[in-house]
Amino acid sequence: MIKVEDYVARTEGTCGKEKDVIVIFKYDKKDEAIKKIMGKAAMKKSIGGIISELTYKSFSFRLYGSGKAIFRDLKDKEELNSLLLELLS
Amino acid sequence: MLDPYKIREDFPILKRRINGNQLIYFDNAATSQKPRQVIDAVKDFYENHNANVHRAVHTLSLEASELYEDAHEEVVEFIHAKGIEEIVFVRGTTEAINLVAYAWGLRTLKKEDEVIVSLMEHHSNIVPWEIISRMTGNKIKYVEVNDDGTLNYESYERLVSKRTKMVCLSHVSNVTGIINDVKRITKFAHEHGALVLIDGAQSVPHLPVNVKDLDADFVVFSGHKMLGPTGIGVLYGKQEILEKMEPFQGGGEMIKEVSYDRKAKRCTVSWNVLPWKFEAGTPNVCGAIGLMAAMRYLKRIGMANVKSHEETLTKYAIPQMEGCCRKVRIYGTKDATIKCGIVPFGVDGLSSHDIALFLDNYGIMVRSGFHCAQPLHEIFKLSSSARASFYVYNTLEEIDRFTEVLKEIEQL
């Protein structure tokens, strides 16, 4: 059973009306996390292979090769956690 | 003229690579990077002179006290104050404004009094006054901002009256970089008997500031935005006003005497002289010494040169940014001559955080969000903005690289 904390170093709520959440993956786990997420989510668009616009169920998000992701329109931290858990399992 | 390439050699962090790219630091309005001279001053203090200041006789304490007082003197010279009595060290701009709001506002303001602030202020120049107004019942009036982000001077002049006791305005907007005519604002306020507090967080680091010439009653700013360490800032106040004010916080250093009156069964206390009356507890000695080194560094460059360099960068950046991608929007005035080096922008269809993350991927650091100025974003009808802000070590080549990367954002 994986834990979100195994992959995520930090989450940062953004400042502004959008209420986006930035997820920063652990440096040594980022490649594994990106691979897992890419395997689960559907690709909408990719730029130079370093930025991917993805959808998973009703969620849309962007994943960066640097090991960061930006999630939109999430209800709360719990929803983010269960989404990450599904994507990283 | 200023040579940014020579200056860059003094900043170790600028050699860093982020995500395999050379770091481009365009988040200077949030905090600046530190030159070797500041880092060395801090290191030297802890390695050779560290002790608590004042009221000790041993060698280290005397050395620390002397350095700490020298730091006050350095600020006097930098902003052209009268003497160290007018220079109070605080944690930063926010604490300085809170000091005035509590030590002056809470004791002075009455229900019928008015405080004027503007809609372009940083939250730190709004919230303390809102808090005080909830305690005293005084009114707060907000000066309107024009569509291009400039201050509406007519709105300001309409709001000032005999009931106005304090006018609190930023010298330079932290969102747009627009420079307000604070001399005009101060003169008008004084004609109506009001005091003036100028938030200099974005002006003192970027242009020559002469407090005597401005004639404002209070000018506040932070060390970390002007090459100094975090946790140190300055409250400049006219001596005659600071003398009349009661202390903000109580503790060591700020008192002259604390004596127990056995008859009254309580202590009688008297205050220390300025500026120590407002510096309760052990101060941030090392931060002050770092700030002194930062001010000496900026003085060597020349503040007029700093201003002119940022104007050159801004003049170059705005058309480059607009030209590189059809989706890029610059917010506020594009006239670099009335701005410091701050460019707020957006990209159609993207949130400011998307923009910042995209740029970060290429080693370019910009800020995204409200920049602690939500009312101004409401005027611009923006949910947030991205902000590129420049300083002495930024170059035209960095702007070229920034716009080259920004061009690619069109694909998102």
Image (cartoon, rainbow, N blue to C red):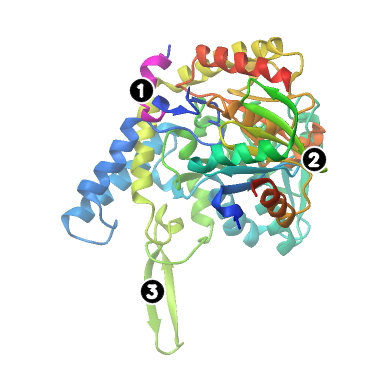
Give the structural element (helix, strand or loop) at label 3. Answer: strand
Give the structural element (helix, strand or loop) at label 2. Answer: helix
Q: Do labels 3 and 2 share a chain?
A: yes
| Tag shown at residue B159 | 2
Residue type, label 2: Leu
Q: Quadrant of residue B376?
A: top right
Q: Which residue is drawn at 54% across and 49% down?
A: B96
Calculate the distance from the C-alpha at mark 1 to the C-alpha at mark 2: 41 Å
Q: Is residue B161 visible?
A: no
**What chain letter is assigned to the residue under label 2?**
B
Tag 1 or tag 3, which sits nearer the N-term?
3
Q: Mark 3 points at which residue?
A: B258
Seen from the viewer's position, the closer of residues B125 and B182 is: B125
Q: Mark 1 points at which residue?
A: B300
B55 left or right, relative to B344: left
Q: Which residue is drawn at 50% across and 63% down?
A: B249
* Cβ–Cβ under 8 Å for marks 3 and 2: no
* Cβ–Cβ under 8 Å for marks 1 and 2: no
* Cβ–Cβ under 8 Å for marks 3 and 1: no
Q: Does the segment drawn in magenta span residue B10?
A: yes
Residue B84 drawn above or below residue B15:
below
* Range drawn in magenta: B3-13
Question: Outermost residue, left direction?
Answer: B59
Tag 2 or tag 3, which sits nearer the N-term?
2
